[in-house]
Image (tube, coloured by chain):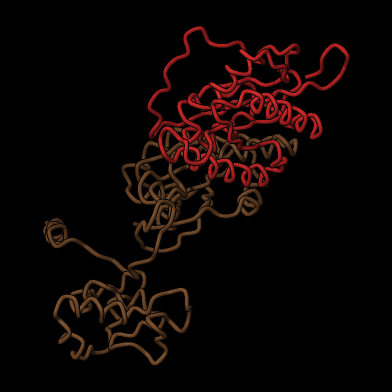
């Protein structure tokens, strides 16, 4: 959570559409742009595929801020995915408010593929916002590893999720969310 | 399909406040289609409850399971294996499902997670409208497939009241006048003569609560098994 100077370094998750924002991230790299290293980029096939549950689970697992980056309006590869993502993010913000977390921790951005500088700007913006809001109160201090490492070791061979219909899902608070 | 909506989060938290171990039971039929109590919504609510409890520093264990239907006994039976481990069960089914679950597990506290709204149709993604009030005496054959019992604010069976205003209802100007719709439809079908038919007063005794219905085939088999 804190770097070696004792300063709060937030963890920011960015769900990036492969057609636009992820490509913009590539471009930002090629342009050698500097932006906050706090952002963890997750590539998704379309911003519309991000569900409210996925966004909530990011916060449950300790993310300080989360944003979804999709195409400009009218540019979605799947026609309406970015519009759906806008709705999903607005809904998830309402859910965060119900829980008692600041809805400002979650945001949707339009980042076209050609906008490398905008990608860097948004990454800085969300990191700045997370710094202002402070650490996510749900973060379990014992599980946090400094220096940008994962709080949980990644699975080498993550098992496929079993078909869950009619199956009891137990939640052990001592175990990380699968 | 039965349309329901989730209760407010405050209400649910309030209901669950005395308990530490809670099972959220979803229903995979009507309320899953209207995005209120299906598998996805159960997961969302359970995640919300855990996060809320964690933020408040409370101990709350929330487990989740979704069954195909809560209004059929065979789907409730498998819950018997683990239902004893919980202080309370939050049912994300319509009112019928909640009660049936409470009947099956009568020593368990079953709480409702949804408010049941109506029998309706999906007008657009995420938008549902009422179409039937289950009056037990269908007259759609005479009204061009448009139900005045449901769609007329005054349940009028013999033409519109005096409040029709350019095809809108005087009770709610945002809603269509059912009888204007019926007239236009019958006009289109060339069946305007049906408008002249006087509907007798409805027999409300057939809709007496609580209603019960036995399929004729099963009715007979019950009689024979009683005779044996």
Q: Nearer the viewer, residue A169 or B186?
A: B186
Q: Quadrant of the N terminus of chain B?
A: bottom left
Q: Nearer the viewer, residue B42 or B128?
A: B128
Which residue shows up at 69% across the image and 30% down it? A65
Image: A60 above or below B100: above
Rendering coords of residue A72 (x, y %): 53, 37
Image: A36 above or below A137: above
Q: Which chain is red?
A: A
Q: Quadrant of residue A121?
A: top right
Observer able to see residue B89: yes
Observer able to see residue A62: no
Is residue A163 found left or right of B159 in the rendered image? right
Q: Quadrant of residue A68?
A: top right
Which residue shows up at 74% across the image and 39% down it? B56
Rendering coords of residue B121 (x, y %): 34, 59
Q: Quadrant of the C terminus of chain B?
A: bottom left
Rendering coords of residue B77 (x, y %): 36, 40
Rendering coords of residue B136 (x, y %): 27, 72
Which residue shows up at 76% across the image and 21% down it? A141
Q: Total number of numbered labels?
A: 0
Is residue B73 found left or right of A37 in the rendered image? left
Q: Quadrant of residue B50?
A: top right
Is residue B19 found left or right of B142 in the rendered image? right
Image: B41 above or below A157: below
Q: Nearer the viewer, residue A117 or B37?
A: A117
Is residue A21 found left or right of A159 in the rendered image? right
Q: Which chain is brown?
A: B
Question: Seen from this angle, which residue lies furthest top?
Answer: A156
């Amino acid at each position: 959570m804190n770097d070696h100077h004792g300063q709060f370094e937030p963890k920011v998750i960015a769900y990036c559409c492969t057609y636009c924002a992820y490509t913009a991230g590539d471009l930002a790299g090629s342009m050698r742009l500097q932006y906050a290293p706090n952002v963890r980029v997750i590539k998704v096939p379309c911003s519309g595929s991000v569900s409210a549950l996925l966004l909530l689970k990011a916060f449950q697992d300790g993310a300080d801020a989360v944003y979804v980056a999709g195409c400009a309006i009218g540019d979605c590869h799947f026609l309406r995915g970015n519009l759906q993502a806008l709705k999903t993010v607005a809904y998830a913000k309402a859910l965060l408010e119900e829980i008692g977390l600041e809805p400002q921790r979650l945001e949707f951005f339009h980042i076209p593929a050609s906008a490398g500088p905008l990608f860097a700007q948004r990454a800085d913006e969300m990191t700045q916002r997370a710094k202002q809001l402070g650490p996510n109160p749900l973060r379990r201090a014992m599980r946090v590893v400094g220096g940008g490492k994962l709080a949980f070791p990644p699975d080498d061979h993550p098992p496929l999720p079993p078909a869950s219909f009619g199956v009891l899902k137990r939640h052990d608070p001592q175990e990380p969310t699968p | 399909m039965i349309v329901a909506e989730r209760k407010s989060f405050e209400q649910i938290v309030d209901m669950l406040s005395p308990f530490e171990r809670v099972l959220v039971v979803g229903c995979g039929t009507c309320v899953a289609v209207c995005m209120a109590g299906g598998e996805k919504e159960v997961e969302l609510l359970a995640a919300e409850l855990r996060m809320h409890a964690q933020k408040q520093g409370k101990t709350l264990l929330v487990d989740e399971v979704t069954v195909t239907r809560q209004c059929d006994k065979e789907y409730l039976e498998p819950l018997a294996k683990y239902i004893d481990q919980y202080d309370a069960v939050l049912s994300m089914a319509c009112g019928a499902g909640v009660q049936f679950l409470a009947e099956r597990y009568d020593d368990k506290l079953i709480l409702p997670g949804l408010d049941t709204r109506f029998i309706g149709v999906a007008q657009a993604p995420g938008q549902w409208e009422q179409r039937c009030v289950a009056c037990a005496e269908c007259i759609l054959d005479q009204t061009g497939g448009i139900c005045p019992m449901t769609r007329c604010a005054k349940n009028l069976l013999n033409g519109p009241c005096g409040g029709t205003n350019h095809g809108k209802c005087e009770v709610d100007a945002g809603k269509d006048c059912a009888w204007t719709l019926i007239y236009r439809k019958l006009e289109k079908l060339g069946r305007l003569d049906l408008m002249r038919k006087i509907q007798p007063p409805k027999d409300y005794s057939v809709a007496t609560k609580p209603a019960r219905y036995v399929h004729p085939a099963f009715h007979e088999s019950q009689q024979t098994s009683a005779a044996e």
